[in-house]
Amino acid sequence: MTDLIIWTILASLLGIIFGSFINVVVFRTKEGQSLGGRSKCRTCLEPIGGMDLIPIVSYFALKGRCRRCSSVIEWQYPAVEMATGILFGLLFARAWLGIGWPNFIDQTEWVALFVRDASIAIFLVIIFVYDFRYSYILDKYSIPAILLALVFNVALGANALSLLLGGLLIGGFFAIQFLVSEGKWIGGGDIRMGLLMGFLLGPALGGVALFVSYVLGALTGIFLILTKQRELNSHVPFGTFLALGTVIAMIWGSGLLNWYLGYF
Ligand SMILES: [Zn+2]
């Protein structure tokens, strides 16, 4: 038990570091900059010193303002760092404890399962944050995630036909809506998210991911309309919900599925 706690904390710290990297990826991708080079304040463009680059800690030590120009540092920084840290901790504890392991994973492969889930999670968090901020699902990150999911799953011994079926069903679900609405309801990015969900989770858990995404999207939409923050016809960054639904299905998908099937 102590081992589990220590390792989960270490996994969370790793997640926090990746969260910091994800913020860099999101802003630099938006601004068309390369991922290399030193971090600068987005307002005064002054390079940021090492002491001010500690994930989460620096944000609070600086009270959310740039040391030089006092401009507000977006809360996205600590939020994404914390969320990615929590996510890595959850994925690690779940792999260690054997909760909802895919049926092709055996005892010796739980570390590989964590590596798979954590790698895909990095892409999903990037897609989540980018779509949330800029309402665009980046192919640059969805396509590598699709390939990564396929490679990991096939290497770990997943049934390739089942993955293919998942990708076709969920990708196809969006592709049909895309064709029927001539691209008005659904964008090409959603089709690629569908492929990712199917290739990562297979048809059953991919279906759970889809269902959870719609429920969360609908609940959020209703909340925003009731609180008058959005109009009925305003745009919803659906990729955000698809990424969130996929992460939830990765961790709790089989539990949710068994719970639901228990009603029949
Ligand atoms: Zn500044």
Image (spheres, rainbow, N blue to C red):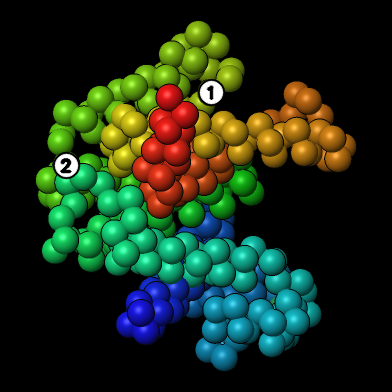
Badge 1 element: loop
N-terminal-most mark, 1 or 2: 2
Image check: 66 left or right of 203? Answer: right
- Note whether residue 60 is visible: yes
- Vertical comparison of 103 with 110: above or below: above
Q: Which residue is mark 2?
A: 158
**Residue 167 falls in image quadrant:** top left
Q: Residues within 10 Å of mark 2 (few under 14, many from 20)?
A: many
Where on the image, by quarter, is ligand 1? bottom right
Per the rendering, the mark at residue 137 is none
- Residue reaching furthest to the right: 228
Residue drawn 64% across the image and 49% down it: 133
Task: Measuring from the top left, give residue 178's x and y in whole percent.
Answer: 48, 17
**Residue 9 falls in image quadrant:** bottom left
Q: Are marks 1 and 2 in contact (CB under 8 Å)?
A: no
Viewer-proximal residue among 168 and 2: 2
Residue drawn 41% across the image and 30% down it: 261
- Picture mark count: 2
Badge 2 element: loop
Residue type at tag 1: Ile
Image check: 260 left or right of 40? Answer: left
Q: Quadrant of the N terminus?
A: bottom left
Q: Which residue is mark 1?
A: 186
Residue drawn 43% across the image and 13% down it: 176
Q: Residues within 10 Å of mark 1 (few under 14, many from 20)?
A: some
Task: Measuring from the top left, give residue 48's x and y in whole percent.
Answer: 59, 83
- Note whether residue 193 is visible: no
